[in-house]
Image (cartoon, coloured by chain):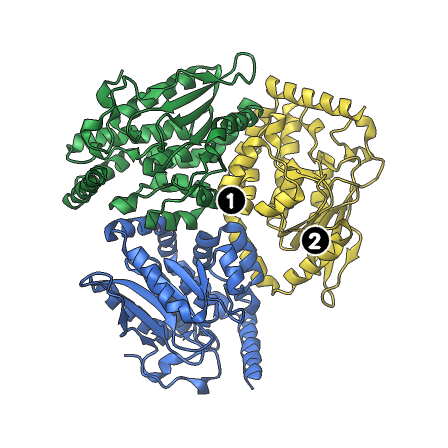
Chain colours: A green, B yellow, C blue
Amino acid sequence: APSPSACRCFAPRESRCANRSCVDASRRLLRPRRGWRVAVMHMKSPPVNSLSLDFLTEFCISLEKLEMDKSCRGLIITSSLPKVFSAGLDILEMYGKSPESCGEFWKAVQEMWLKLYSSNMVTVAAINGSSPAGGCLMSLTCDYRIMVDNPRYSIGLNETQLGIVAPFWFKDTMANTVGHRITEMALALGMLYSPAEALKIGLVDQIVPEEKLMSTAEQAMAKWLAIPAHARQLTKSMMRKPTVDRMTSKREADVQNFVSFITKDAIQNSLRVYLEMLKKRKA
Amino acid sequence: APSPSACRCFAPRESRCANRSCVDASRRLLRPRRGWRVAVMHMKSPPVNSLSLDFLTEFCISLEKLEMDKSCRGLIITSSLPKVFSAGLDILEMYGKSPESCGEFWKAVQEMWLKLYSSNMVTVAAINGSSPAGGCLMSLTCDYRIMVDNPRYSIGLNETQLGIVAPFWFKDTMANTVGHRITEMALALGMLYSPAEALKIGLVDQIVPEEKLMSTAEQAMAKWLAIPAHARQLTKSMMRKPTVDRMTSKREADVQNFVSFITKDAIQNSLRVYLEMLKKRKA
Amino acid sequence: APSPSACRCFAPRESRCANRSCVDASRRLLRPRRGWRVAVMHMKSPPVNSLSLDFLTEFCISLEKLEMDKSCRGLIITSSLPKVFSAGLDILEMYGKSPESCGEFWKAVQEMWLKLYSSNMVTVAAINGSSPAGGCLMSLTCDYRIMVDNPRYSIGLNETQLGIVAPFWFKDTMANTVGHRITEMALALGMLYSPAEALKIGLVDQIVPEEKLMSTAEQAMAKWLAIPAHARQLTKSMMRKPTVDRMTSKREADVQNFVSFITKDAIQNSLRVYLEMLKKRKA
C-alpha cells in the first residue's frame, strides 16, 4: 500500500496529502443488472491529483483488481478534489531524479495508459475540473468523456508549453479522438481548451452543469452496458489494438527516449523554471 | 439465375418473395454523353432486401456485367421496396447453418464489398429507407450517398446490438468516411442514425425529400461523370487501395474468423433470440 | 541566380515576367525576441506565380538559406501579385517536354514539398488570392493557413479537372489536414473551395479581410513562436515524419510514375486542350 508520500504533486512538497490512499475505488453505484457492478474511482491526491509514481502504482493495482472482478462491468473516473480532475504527470518525478528513477516512473505512465486504453470495462471520465497533460491523456483513454461546463476548467495536451514533448502514444490517442490536424496544432501550441471548445472539437463527448455530472455519467454507463459485453469488447479491441500494439512494440525504446530527453540539462532547466513559477504563483 | 428462394430475408421464411430476380438493373437513365449510360439497380427482395447468399451472388454477377460494359459509367443503387433500403446480412444464412455454408456466405459478402468499393464506375447510393448493418456497408462503399430525409429511416453499423461484431473492413470503410472516433463509438454502441444525424457526422452526403431522391442522384452522377474518367478512377484507386489490399491480404483469415465466431453456441443463441423477437414483432 | 525566364507560368510565354527574381525573401518583419527574425517570402512571378522549374529551384535555395540561419525562426509565404497566391505547377514544364525534363521538374516539386513540410521554422501561409493545385499543396505544407475572405478566390487540389492526378503525397498532405473522406471527394471531383468553404472543412485555419491578412499572419506567428522551439520542432517532426518517410521511400518510383503518366499521348492531349482554353480565355 502506498505511503502518505504517494500523493506528491507538482506543488511544493510540503503540501503532500496526508491520505493513506490516493485512489478511492470502494464506493460502488449502479447495479445495471443483478450481479453487475460499476466502480467509481475518486482520485484524491491533494492538492491537484498529480500522477506520481506511487499514485500510478496504486491506480494500476486498483484497476487490475476491478478488471479481474467479473461482476464489475464499468468504471467511472472522477476527482474528489475541487477544480481539478488531474494536473497530469508529477513533475517532481522528472526533476533532479536519476535516470533509473525516471525510467521507472515512465514505465508506470505507460502501464496506466495500457491498462486503461485496453480495459474490458466500460470506462467513463467524469471530468470535474481542469485536466491538462497526463490528466487529459487519462480522459482520452476512456470510452466516453463528460466534462463539467465551467469555463474556468480546461483540458488538453499542453506539454510543449513546459518545453517537453508528448510521446507518440499520447499523440496517437489524441489523433484517434480528434483527428490528425487538430492534434497537430493542439500539440504544437500546447493548447488547453475550455469545456465548450473541447466539445466542439470532440475532445470531450458531453458537457453538463457540475451538479448533473455523476447522473449523466451513470446514464452514459447504462447505455454502454446495455450492449452485449463480448461484442462491445471485441469491437473496442479492434478499434484500439493497432495503437496498443504500436506502443508495446516500441515500449523499451520509448522509455530510453524519455529518460535521455528528460535528463538533459536544458530540459531540467525548463522544469526548474516552471516549478519556481508555480511556487511564486502559490505565494 | 437465382431461384425464387433467392429472396430470403430475416423475416419468417414464408414471406420469401416470388420474384424471379432480386436485382433489377435493366432500367437505364441518364445518357450524360453520346454512348454513355448509367445503370440504376433497384433492389427488390421482399420484405426487406436482406443480403442472402443468392441475393449477393446475383448482385455480384450484375455488377460484373456492368463493370465490363465500357459504355456504362455510373451506377445508382436504390430499393424498390417501401421504407427499407436493405436490412443487411440475411441472418438465416448464419443461423443453424454448417460451417461450410457460413464460410461460403461470408465469401459472398466479401465479394460484394470488394466489387463495390473498388468499382471503376461512379457509384451513388440513393437510400430510400432504413439501412442498418450490411445495408449501411453497401452505402458506404459508394462514391456518394443521398438519403431520404424521413426521421423514421435510420442508418448505421448496429451489429453489436445483435451481439455480433462488424469485421475490420466494415470498420475501415466507416472510419474512412466518418473518422476513427465516431466509428469507435458508433460500432461499440451499435448506433443507428436518423438521416439528419447521419448528415451531421458525414455518414451520408446529402438528405432530400423522398420525391427528389432520384433527380438529386442524377444530378450528383452528372457532376461526377463530368470529371475525366481515367483521372477519377486513378484517384479513387489511390484513396481506397490500401483498405482493399488490407482486406484481400487477410481474406482467408477473415472467413475463418467469421465462421468460428458465428458458429459458437452463445452467438447462435443470440441470433435465435433476435429472430424470435422479429417474429413476435411481426405477429 | 535564376534568369528572367525563371518566371514562366501556364499563361502564354510572352507574358513572362521581367523580374530578376521570382521570390523576394529580403523583407523581414517581426522581431519576436532579440536576435530572432521572421522571413516573409513574397512570390512574384507574373502573371500567376506558376511553379516552374526555375521558380522551384530558386524557392528551395531561399528556403535552405533561411533554414540554416539560426536566427530565422519563422516564414510567412504570400504573393506580390493581385488575385493569385500561386496557380500551381507550371503546365509548360509538363507539355511537350522530354521525359528527362519532366523527371527533373518533378524532383523539384518533391524537393519543395519535402523542405516545406519538414521545415524547422514556423511556416504560415498568407493566402491572398486563388490557390489551386500546387498552390494549395504549398499552403497545406505550412503550420497555419490564413486566407483572404474574398469569394472570388478559391483553393483546392483540382488536378482531376485537368485530367491529371494528384500523387499520393499530395493526397496524404490533404488527408492529414481535412481527413480521408473530404479528401476522397475533393480529389475525385477536383474541387475548388471558396475561402468560407475552405474554413468550414478545415482546409484553411482562418479567413480575414484583405487588409488584415499580414497583421493576422504576424499575430499567428507570434503565438507559434511563443512555444519553446525544440519542443515545437520535435512535435512537428513526430506528426509529419511518417508522411515524409513514406514519400522519400517511394521518391524514385514516384518520379518514374509521373514521367510515364505525363508523357502519355492522351495526357499530353488533355494539357494541350487546357492550354488552348487558357489562351482563348485570355484573348
Residue A93: give its label.
none
Q: Residue at x 44, y 14 (%)?
A: A69
Q: Which residue is the site of mark 1?
A: B179
Residue A43 falls in image quadrant:
top left
Residue C4, given in percent of the width and then of the height, sits at 34, 84
Q: Residue at x 40, y 27 (%)?
A: A78
Tag in front: 2 or 1:
1
Q: What is the three-letter code of the residue carrying label 1?
A: Gly
The one nearer the camera, C26 or A275, is A275
Considering the image in quadrants, where does the C terminus of chain B appear? top right
The disc numbered 1 marks a residue on which chain?
B
**Disc 2 crowd, CA 10 A, few/some/many (<14, 14-19, 20+):** many
Q: What is the three-letter code of the residue carrying label 2?
A: Leu
Q: Is residue A82 above or below residue C135?
A: above
The disc numbered 2 marks a residue on which chain?
B
Residue B155, given in percent of the width and then of the height, sits at 65, 40
**Disc 1 crowd, CA 10 A, few/some/many (<14, 14-19, 20+):** many
Question: Considering only order in the chain, which callout, 1 or 2, is on the residue closer to the N terminus?
Answer: 2
Q: Residue furthest top?
A: A35
Q: Alpha-carbon distance for marks 2 and 1?
A: 26 Å
Q: Is residue C146 above or below residue A225?
A: below
Residue C138 falls in image quadrant:
bottom left
Q: Residue at x 24, y 65 (%)?
A: C31
The one nearer the camera, B165 or A21, is A21
Residue B171, given in percent of the width and then of the height, sits at 54, 38
One can see residue C110 in this view? no
The one nearer the camera, C174 or B74, is C174
Label 1 secondary element: loop
Considering the image in quadrants, where does the N terminus of chain B appear? top right
Q: Residue at x 65, y 56 (%)?
A: B122
Residue B75: give its label.
2
Residue B128 falls in image quadrant:
top right
